[in-house]
Image (cartoon, helix red, strand yellow):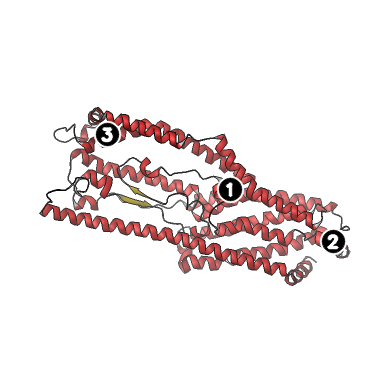
Amino acid sequence: MLIHIIKNEWRNLRADKTLWLVAGLFAVSVAYAMFNGLAWTNFQRQTIAEAAAEDSERYDALKKQIVEYERSAPEKLSRFSDPRDPAAAGRNIGQKYAAMSPAPLASLSIGQSDLLPYYFKISTRSQQTFTANDELENPTNLLAGRFDVAFVVIYLLPLLILVLSYNFLSGEREAGTLPMLLAQPISLRSVVLGKIALRFAVVTVLALGFHPLVFFLIGGGKLLTAEGALLGAVLWAAAIVAYIAFWFALAIAVNAFNWKSATNAIALAAVWLLFVILIPSLTGVLVTSVYPVPSRVEMIGAMRDASSDASARGSQILAKYTEDHPELVQGEYDPNDAAARTYAVQETVDREVQPILAIYDEQLQKQQNLANNLRFLSPAMVMQEALNDISGTGNARYRHFLAQVKIFHAEWQNYFIPRVFQKARVTAATYDAAPRFVWQEENSPAVARRVLFGLLGIIAFTLAAAAFGFSAIRRYSAIGG
């Protein structure tokens, strides 16, 4: 009998223009979102390629200049532009790019990739000079941004589901066909299950049916051979199915209240507004209120004060620095070496402002931890976090990138700063042997664990709504209007 209900429901849906209208709008939305996502990730890849090309061309030019200067040195050449000077090489003209390549599925969810930097220009300067724009990912930013496929899934897909299911039971009752249907040897629960099963299948096919084309547009046949891409595609599909199931379970719960169809529509719209808009926005306000970060203006002011004070004591600091690091000094100690004094002062400033930066980072991390815990208040927040993780545009992957950048920055300083103190000449071989940044992708199983843990929250919501709905169905009145 359940099969007969599904077949009859399919005939009714096919005859209803609403299905074809919302399907067409959904297809257009996915196409436009895909265009936006591809445009952004292509821009990122092009930018990274141009940075790598600029790095290579600049290094070739620097090595050629060294050869020319060894043959015939210019009469007037500033040390700031001399490729043979280690201070200039490490601090200015020899800087290296460190970039995080877009993940294979990055175009599906732009996430915070348009807010957080995906490349840095590394030098011997303080780390704060190139990571000062590091910001917190919060739910408000997560749920507002570019129009991408994740946006369509999180915002628009629930509306499609609600349009198709707000009156799947109340409509039958208002039309007077529900009592006749129940006159057959079938329970109301079976009727509900058949109607929802068909709608669930239709929406799932609509939501996932576009993805083979989407994956082809992203990378052709090579996409699923990329590291982590196949697992990501499976997780993406699983997340969408779980999200669809939640909204259908919610529709069952609302329809079980014996309300009219118009009341059902208003109630479901209110729930959509609550879960998709209000809770994420209020969560963002809450985390910044509970764990406010120190003013960036005050932090920058403190850094400037420390820098000014240290600069005024430059000679003393340099003497203390060389005393603590005798291995750096070769030959006669020069207290007037401006480059050496700069790095000695920089090291002192970094050490003095570290407590301030630690407080700032600690508050940011507390905010992020609280936001991660509170995301379970809304399936939409869980879904956004999961899709960002799958696409490689979330906070975790960025932190993974930043950790590698910090390591590379330390390697860069350790390579050039000793040469500054030792007054060692930089040669073409020095540039060839300089550290290079190699991006190491995040571990796929770790991503999968985070995503699946989040999906458990959506499943819990789904089971609760479905259990309530099917329980309330027992008291549903088939007569009314």
Give percent across and percent down for residue 306: 35, 31
Can you say which quadrant of the picture contains the N terminus?
A: bottom right
Work out how far the residue at label 1 is from the one at label 3, CA to CA, in angstroms: 47 Å
Tell me which residue sits at (43%, 44%) in the image.
133
Amino acid type, label 2:
Glu
**Chain-order first, disc 2 or disc 3:** 2
Tell me which residue sits at (51%, 61%) in the image.
36
Amino acid type, label 1:
Phe
* Marks 1,3: beta carbons within 8 A: no
Q: Which mark is residue 174?
A: 2
Mark 3 lies on residue: 344
Can you say which quadrant of the picture contains the C terminus?
A: bottom right
Of marks 1 and 2, the one in the foreground = 2
Nearer to us in this view, 49 or 21: 21
**Chain-order first, disc 1 or disc 3:** 3
Mark 1 lies on residue: 453
Amino acid type, label 3:
Ala
Of marks 1 and 3, the one in the foreground = 3
Give percent across and percent down for residue 353: 38, 32
